[in-house]
């Protein structure tokens, strides 16, 4: 009998060990499988956050591999969708990323009225995951013709609310509980209070607490079963209260001490006396992980102690938000909470502002980073957005793991914030849960259904019948962008060019070549692959409709808002003092003449569209059209006008798309066709190019087509001018440098106009090739003389 009992006990021990080992293996497999495919982080720095509606917007984007924390060098296609505050799409752009970063720059126009706008960045690959991995940044745009009310920094107490966050989401009776408190207004601006109270049903004060500048605080208390508790605060003569959630008779919660020496993390799993009895002989696994990097340990309550202390080394954990989970024997999650682990070192930054000749300033920077990409925005000290709200660290290490990302993260990573660590721990306490839910990890591992797109694909069929298609080649060319590619035909006379990196509205030429490398005429069909890049989370964001603040501090009326005044910057004065010299006027006497000045911008098609024609691309074949503005309502006006470039008729209007207006010297528009014979009866357009402009496009007899939905065209960023110093100080930009590359010496210099500034604000964001991040805001002063 003894022998049998001994065998039974040994078998029980072995079975228990096997079950524990098996569960830990299953947990590891579930987590590693769920995070098997690399995910991307995107952060975008804008040169500022408030713009008037005739400015350029500049931004620099950074893409990081979420597992390795290194730049995501394989990502190339970034989709941008811009929404207004009614969640209507205003504009779309495809942005080109290289070596883990991308840039954008575009000029505002009358589509952007006064209001808030949301810039949504994502990749097609992100659609493979249940969680939203995209990035959204909001900006404000101001119409110069309307007075602008400067906003107060004070929170709106009329919309204030209290949110409570019990540790691990549960309040357990007869044991010590930590309760997070968050007090914010409708715009999620934190409210700082000095004396909040917790009272019971008899109005006894059970605990007191305060909140920090972000509105976060906490208190401890030991609740009595069936008692009712209420949180009360008083702020600015207003009283707010909120009842605590129902007290539970038992359960499990998680606490921790993240401030021990030797990189030790102490986690306490606790219950009450009822829980000790309930969980006897039950085994749990404590799991700490970020993505697929995890550590775990088994524990029980068999020693009749309601608290179990488990220690880990933080050196085995990833920097940023990690999740602590308690998993039972059936692989169900019992409870969870978040923790922020800080194992990174901060780069050392030295900045110096020096005056130089010609009323300019020089920013000299030294950062102990090698092979890093940075973006730097320099603003007047009094710019109305004086507080930096976002941070690349806050996006990559914090927001990318939260169900509800924080709108303002910079203070939690500000090197000048002396309470940075405490503020971050309070923020993490006041979170509901990790956005990576355990049930999804268990049941819904991602499947790679959406490819990571790289450029676009051009394919089609050659109509000419050939006995040996493999001996023929198809050539693809863009003369202006210097693209020259060749591919072979398959046995079905099909061709394909993949990973074509070209700007939007690029004109391509395509032709068939035989084995002797001679051009062979044939009709060639062209299909441009434009995949559906709509993000499945495209509208998974909210815009709180909040009442306006009643205590606006100041109203700005722009000098140029006088509608009766004439803005001379937008007027071209002709024949006032010196007659404009037109070189090609002879023979074009009946036409309206345009001498192209340096103030013109955009493409040649844009110019014609601003001067009496409808221009664009046919939706059926993406070919260029130029039509009379009345062609939709007046009969016999749908044909194109005759277009000449340097007196040579252009039979393929796609060639017009090759030219920007700054390559043109003169344009003559004769809508009646009186200055020559008009074949279509819809007028004549004569274009004369500047000397030295490339005319090779005009000589080709190849088949042409326009690539639409390509990468957005590069626009040179320009600082906007303001009428008064006050307007510039509040809204202007001194310099925007989005592409600073640090090599081995780790130094950089930026020169910019002084604009009567004695103190400036410098905002630096970026990362190095080994994944080190930098995010700093500095106020620098300079002396009056060099």
Image: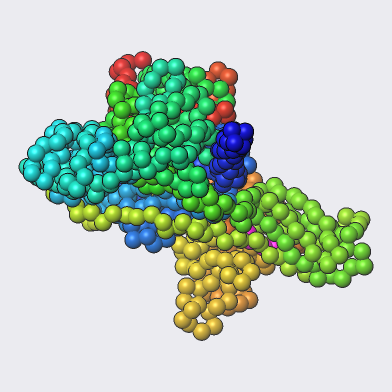
Viewer-nearest residue: 428 or 148: 428
Q: Is residue 487 above or below residue 5?
A: below
The answer to whether 226 appears left or right of 720 in the picture is: left
- What colouring does the structure picture have? rainbow
Position of the N terminus, as image quadrant, is top right
Q: Residue furthest top?
A: 786
Q: Is residue 16 above or below residue 484?
A: above
Magenta portion: prevailing SS class: strand
Does 705 appear in magenta? yes
Is residue 267 among the parts visible in the rendering? no
Q: Quadrant of residue 341?
A: top left
Is residue 16 among the parts visible in the rendering? yes
Position of the C terminus, as image quadrant, is top left
Viewer-nearest residue: 516 or 170: 170
Viewer-nearest residue: 749 or 542: 542
Q: What segment is highlighted magenta in the picture? A: 704-708
For the point 68% across and 57% down, which residue is it? 457
* Residue 700 pos. (x, y %): 74, 59
Q: Residue furthest front?
A: 1
Q: Quadrant of residue 354?
A: top left
The answer to whether 110 appears left or right of 164 in the picture is: right
Viewer-nearest residue: 611 or 189: 189
For the point 58% across and 43% down, which residue is it? 26
The answer to whether 546 appears left or right of 484 in the picture is: left
* Residue 505 pos. (x, y %): 59, 57
* Residue 551 pos. (x, y %): 13, 45
The answer to whether 724 appears left or right of 315 in the picture is: left
For the point 51% across and 73% down, which residue is it? 628
Does 39 appear in magenta? no
* Residue 715 pos. (x, y %): 50, 46
Q: Is residue 224 above or below residue 767?
A: below
């Amino acid at each position: 009998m003894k022998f049998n009992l001994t065998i039974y006990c040994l078998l029980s021990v072995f079975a228990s060990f096997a079950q524990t080992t098996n569960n830990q293996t299953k947990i590891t497999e579930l987590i590693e499988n769920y995070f098997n495919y690399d995910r991307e982080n995107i952060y975008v720095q804008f040169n500022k956050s408030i713009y008037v509606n005739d400015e350029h917007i500049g931004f620099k984007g950074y893409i990081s591999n979420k597992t390795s924390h290194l730049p995501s060098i394989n990502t190339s296609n970034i989709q941008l969708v811009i929404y207004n505050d009614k969640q209507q799409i205003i504009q779309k752009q495809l942005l080109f990323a290289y070596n883990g970063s991308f840039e954008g720059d575009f000029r505002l126009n009358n589509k952007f009225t006064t209001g808030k706008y949301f810039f949504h960045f994502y990749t097609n690959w992100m659609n493979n995951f249940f969680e939203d991995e995209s990035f959204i940044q909001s900006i404000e745009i101001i119409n110069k013709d309307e007075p602008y009310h400067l906003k107060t920094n004070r929170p709106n107490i009329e919309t204030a609310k209290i949110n409570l966050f019990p540790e691990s989401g549960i309040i357990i009776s007869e044991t010590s509980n930590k309760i997070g408190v968050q007090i914010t207004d409708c715009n999620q601006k934190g409210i700082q209070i000095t004396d909040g109270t917790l009272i019971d049903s008899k109005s006894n004060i059970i605990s007191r607490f305060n909140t920090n500048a972000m509105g976060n605080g906490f208190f401890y208390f030991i609740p009595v079963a069936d008692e009712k508790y209420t949180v009360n605060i008083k702020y600015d003569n207003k009283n707010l209260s909120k009842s605590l959630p129902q007290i539970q008779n038992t359960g499990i919660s998680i606490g921790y001490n993240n401030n021990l020496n030797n990189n030790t993390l102490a986690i306490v799993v606790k219950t009450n006396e009822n829980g000790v009895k309930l969980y006897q002989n039950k085994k749990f696994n404590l799991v700490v992980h970020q993505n697929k990097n995890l550590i775990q340990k088994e524990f029980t309550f068999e020693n009749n102690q309601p608290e179990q202390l488990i220690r880990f080394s933080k050196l085995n954990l990833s920097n940023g938000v990690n999740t602590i989970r308690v998993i039972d024997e059936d692989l169900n999650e019992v409870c969870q909470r978040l923790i922020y682990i800080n194992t990174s070192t901060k780069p050392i930054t030295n900045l110096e502002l020096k005056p130089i000749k010609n009323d300019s300033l020089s920013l000299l920077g030294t950062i102990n980073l090698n092979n890093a990409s940075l973006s730097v925005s320099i603003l007047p000290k009094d710019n109305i957005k004086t507080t930096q709200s976002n941070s690349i660290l806050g996006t990559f290490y914090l927001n990318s793991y939260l169900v509800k990302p924080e709108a303002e993260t910079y203070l939690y990573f500000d090197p000048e914030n002396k309470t940075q660590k405490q503020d971050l721990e309070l923020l993490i306490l006041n979170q509901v849960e990790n956005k990576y839910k355990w049930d999804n990890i268990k049941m819904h591992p991602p499947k790679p259904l959406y490819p990571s797109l790289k450029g676009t694909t051009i394919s089609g069929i050659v109509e000419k019948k050939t006995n040996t298609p493999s001996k023929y080649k198809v050539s693809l060319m863009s003369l202006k962008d210097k693209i020259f590619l060749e591919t072979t035909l398959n046995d079905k006379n099909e061709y394909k060019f993949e990973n074509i990196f070209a700007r939007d509205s690029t004109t391509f030429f395509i032709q068939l070549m035989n084995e002797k490398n001679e051009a062979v005429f044939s009709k060639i069909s062209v299909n441009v692959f434009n995949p559906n890049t709509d993000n499945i989370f495209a509208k998974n964001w909210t815009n709180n409709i909040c009442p306006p603040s009643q205590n606006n501090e100041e109203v700005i009326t722009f000098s140029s808002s006088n509608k009766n005044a004439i803005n001379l910057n937008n007027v071209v004065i002709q024949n006032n003092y010196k007659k404009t010299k037109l070189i090609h006027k002879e023979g074009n006497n009946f036409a309206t003449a345009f001498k192209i000045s340096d103030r013109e911008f955009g493409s040649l098609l844009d110019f014609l569209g601003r001067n009496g024609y409808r221009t664009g691309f046919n939706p059926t074949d993406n070919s260029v059209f130029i039509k009379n503005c009345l062609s939709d309502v007046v009969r016999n006006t749908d044909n194109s006008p005759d277009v000449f470039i340097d007196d040579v008729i252009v039979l393929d209007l796609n060639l017009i798309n090759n030219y920007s207006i700054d390559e043109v010297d003169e344009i003559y528009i004769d809508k009646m066709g009186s200055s020559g014979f008009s074949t279509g009866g819809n007028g004549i357009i004569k274009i004369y190019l500047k000397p030295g402009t490339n005319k090779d496009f005009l000589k080709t007899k190849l088949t042409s087509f326009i690539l639409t939905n390509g990468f957005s065209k590069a626009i040179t960023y320009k600082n906007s001018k303001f009428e008064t110093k006050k307007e510039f100080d509040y809204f202007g930009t001194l310099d925007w440098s989005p592409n600073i590359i640090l090599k081995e010496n780790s130094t950089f210099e930026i020169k910019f106009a002084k604009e009567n500034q004695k103190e400036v604000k410098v905002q630096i964001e970026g990362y190095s090739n080994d994944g080190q991040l930098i995010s700093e805001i500095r106020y620098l002063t300079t002396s009056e003389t060099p």
